[in-house]
Image (cartoon, grey):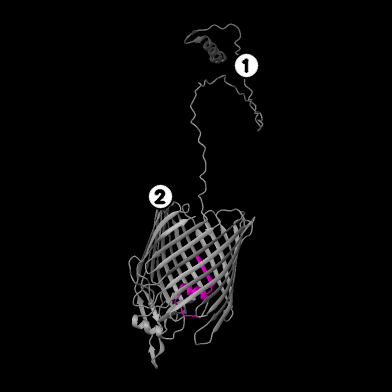
Amino acid sequence: MKNLLLIPILGLLVAPALAQVTNPGGEYIIQGVYSPTLMDAQKIDLRPEPIDTILPTLPVRYDVLPVKAEIPAKVDSIAAAKLSVLAPQPQLYKGFVKAGFGLYTTPLGELYFDQTRSRKNGYGIHAKHFSSNGGLDDVGPSVYSFNSVDGYYKHFLPDHEATGRLMYDRRRVSYYGYAANDSINDALDALDAPEDARKQFYNDIWFAGRLRSLYTDSTKFTHDVGLEVHSYSNLSESRETNMRVNATGQMTVGAETYGGSLLIDNNAYKGVVKDLAEFRQNGTLVGLQPHVSTKGDAYLVRVGVGLFVDALGSTTFHFYPQAYAHYSLFNNILIPYAGLHGERRRNSFRSLTQANPWLIGAPALANTSLMYDLYGGLRGSFSSDLGFDVRVSKSRQDAMPLYVNVSNAPFGDRMDVVYDRVDVLDLSGEVNYRRKEAISFSARVDVFTYKTKVQLEAWNLPPYQLTFGGRYDMRGKLIVKAEAQFLGKRPAFRLGDTITQGGLTVLVPSSSVDLDGYLDLYLGLEYRYTKRLSIFVDMSNLSASKYERWYRYPVQRGLLLGGVTYAF
């Protein structure tokens, strides 16, 4: 039984031995003890090592290639050099005379005499005469004349300029504002009329001095101080003495500019009315207007205030805000701007009669307050030669002077001044063109709207106004000048009055009338025969219309005047 059990055990032990010597590919004979071994592997040691953040500097090597450029020799011809010499300054002549004669027995004479160029000082004199016998039909004698003599002296200091000026001006006008014929003129001549009944003289003797700085450094305080003294009188023996001091100054600190102006205006006026007692109006106007401004590459902003004390009659204080700003667009092609302004203005005997010389011999005075002038607009240029300005303004003036007719029978009308508060809306546009020195022109249109407080209308003020001016220079030989002015209808007013004629008292009622609009054209021609000698022709009122700028005071029809000029 035991032997039977050993047989399968031996079979299990012998089977592996047979498997080692038996192979499907052939037979292998192994002698000895089979002892398999594994060969040693060569492994790479990849242990982590720290790397410093500062990398070592790699050496840089510069190599110069031994290359030589071959430049062929070439000889070029050099043009002869021309020496550029600046043109000398144009020659100046010490003297200049102008003489002419025109229709209606109108002589003209004018003289200039100056020192010419100097680095130390300058002086000169100017004298002028212009008169006419009027030549107007159906009105009173209309003779007028203008005479003036003006001398000045200027001295240059290291950083300043001092100027003195002395002038005498005499103007004569006629009160021709009435319908007349030979019989009426003979009757008026036979009356024992006062000397100033049909004519008036205005004499102005004045002196002016000025001192202004010439600093080139804007951080220094630049200043300009002026003094004017006028002694003004007329044939009616009314007289006025006015002294005016006006000083301005400014200084730049960084981007800001600080400045201001000071005004001291003292006026002493004595009005003389024939057959009535004289009256006096004296007063001093003092104004201080400080301001500060800042400026950038494309903008400017200025703010200030106007402080005025007026002692004409009763002493009053006035305060006016002032401001201005503009901004540049597209490199100054378009500049929108806006501002607000106000001030106190002197109305003197001299200023009123210069605006309207046909005033009565002794008008009453009152100063005007520009309570505000609020404006804005757009200016710019279409090209380097053509520019424009479009503007709208709304202003209010208190005690604005308006002129009305008053009866002076039997010697006709003259004018007086009335004062009223007037609101003005002004829409305006202006165009300017200039092409070097050959041609230039400008045109401007204003459309006004008025609103008065007491008066029914803004007497003698136009609802619209158009002005034009042009000049053409043909190679310095022929010069053509043209001007035009067009005013719309203007309301005029004549005050009523009671007059005595032949022992009877007659009432002249008040009346108003609309003066027709008018167009006044001027054309001037000058031919320069040489640099010193030229001839000229001036033609005024080419339409030959007998229009009235002031009620009952028509102007001359077309005036033709010709003459010569000579420099020496």
Q: Position of residue 54 (x, y in %)?
A: 66, 32
**Which residue shows up at 51% across the image and 33% down it?**
81
Quick one: label 1, few (<14), some, or many (20+) residues within 10 Å? few
The residue closer to the viewer here, 281 or 287, is: 281
Q: Position of residue 112 (x, y in %)?
A: 50, 60
Dot 2 falls on a residue whose secondary structure is: loop
Q: Looking at the image, is mark 2 or mark 1 earlier in the sequence?
A: 1
490 left or right of 69 in image: left
Residue labelled with disc 2 = 475
> From the image, which quarter does the N terminus lie in?
top right
Residue labelled with disc 1 = 40
The residue closer to the viewer here, 59 or 541, is: 541
Vertical placement of 191 versus 516: above or below?
below
Q: Is residue 368 at least partly visible in the picture? A: no
Q: Position of residue 349 (x, y in %)?
A: 51, 76
Q: Which residues are magenta?
A: 339-363
Does the magenta-highlighted stretch encompass residue 396?
Answer: no
The residue closer to the viewer here, 17 or 560, is: 560
Tell me, yes or no, whether the two marked residues, 2 and 1, touch with CB atoms within 8 Å.
Answer: no
Dot 1 falls on a residue whose secondary structure is: loop
390 left or right of 156 in image: left
Vertical placement of 97 versus 173: above or below?
above
Q: CA distance from mark 2 to mark 1?
A: 115 Å
Type of the residue with mark 2: Arg
Q: Total of numbered circles in the picture?
A: 2
